[in-house]
Image (tube, helix red, strand yellow):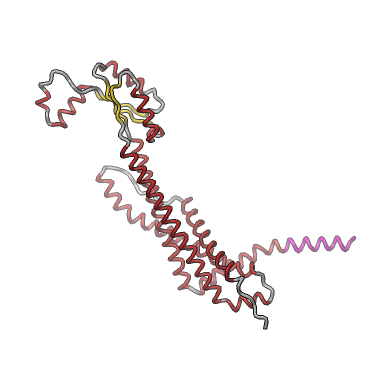
Amino acid sequence: MSSSHSSKLGQRDSLIRQLFNLPIRHLQQSVGSLGDLWRTPFTSVMTIFVLGISLALPATLHLFVKNAEKVSEQWDSASQITLFLKLSVNDKGAQNFVKRLKLYPEVSDVHYISAKQALKEFKILSGFGQSLEYLEKNPLPATILVTPTKHASQASAANDLLAKLKQEREVDQGKLDLEWLNRLEAMAQLIKDIVSGVALLLCLSVVLIVGNTIRLAILSQHDAIAIMKLVGATDSFIQRPFLYSGVWYGVFGGLLSWLVVSLLAQYLTGAIAKLTDLYQSNFQLEGLAFSEVLMLIAFAVLLGLAGSYISVRKHIRGIEPNAD
């Protein structure tokens, strides 16, 4: 009874010792793999640069798409519905209609332009001021500019709001120019699809580059791996340093891609500032957020790990010690 109890205690102690030593072994092998990269500086630096620059391109395109969406959101919020009132509606009736419009939950702002004010502006802009003096009656209707809320500025919601406003008894015609907005949305979707396609191809190239680099490292240590297998080392133990090498490639490549994107954004900030000054806009280029940087590095690590895993699973299994 005591022998079986001591055996169970020994097995438990052995299991606890293995669990305790496991992270230590992983830490040792990760540091050792970093040392292997240091011992082959040219190959390591070239691989990191290729990985970093390959990831910098889709990250830069993502940055431009994000800023383009920021600009388009400002344009969407500035879209307006123009309502032309019937000629029979007087100023008092128009003012009452404006008060009703402000109660609409889809309406953010309402601007009223009287028939007299519209005619005055038309005289100035058209250049026919003296000719219009001979008119007996003002042919221009009163106009109301309706600014939808942010949610109602979308194409379908704005169309629904226009249809609802047209049903008001004071409205003669309503106008909403959505053609430019639809074109903008189509262009933005096209750019997103291009970014996704380019990113997919570049990510595939990163996996292949890391896999080929790890393959060359495995072939250079062919004899050492065969000896390790001869003395009883498992495939998982042998594979671990090469997997960590892929992780380190991803870490350094992700940091390099973030640095490239940041430098490019800083370089373009001056040119964008000059352009926005011409349009009297306060738009500023927004860089990658901290969460996006972490996602970029994590994604680079995932690609590096995938490339190294594919390579070690294929090549380390094929190395067998000679019987003699």
Residue beneath the point at 67% across and 83% down = 324
Q: Which of 280 and 176 is in front in this view?
A: 176
Residue 128's image quarter?
top left
- Drawn side of residue 57 relative to residue 18, left or right: left
Disc tally is 0
Secondary structure that dominates the magenta span = helix
x, y percent for residue 82: 29, 28
Image x and y of residue 28, in percent: 61, 67
Q: Does the magenta stretch include residue 11?
A: yes
Which residue ends up furthest to the bottom in the rendered image?
Answer: 324
Residue at left 33%, top 34%?
A: 79
Q: Which residue is drawn at 39% across and 22% down?
A: 103
- In the image: residue 134, left or right of residue 267: left
Q: In the drawing, does residue 77 fall left or right of residue 118?
A: right
217 drawn magenta: no
**Residue stretch in magenta:** 1-17
Q: In this view, does 94 lie above or below 150?
A: above
Q: Nearer the viewer, residue 126 or 124?
A: 126
Q: Position of residue 257 (x, y in %)?
A: 43, 59
The quarter in which the N terminus is drawn is bottom right
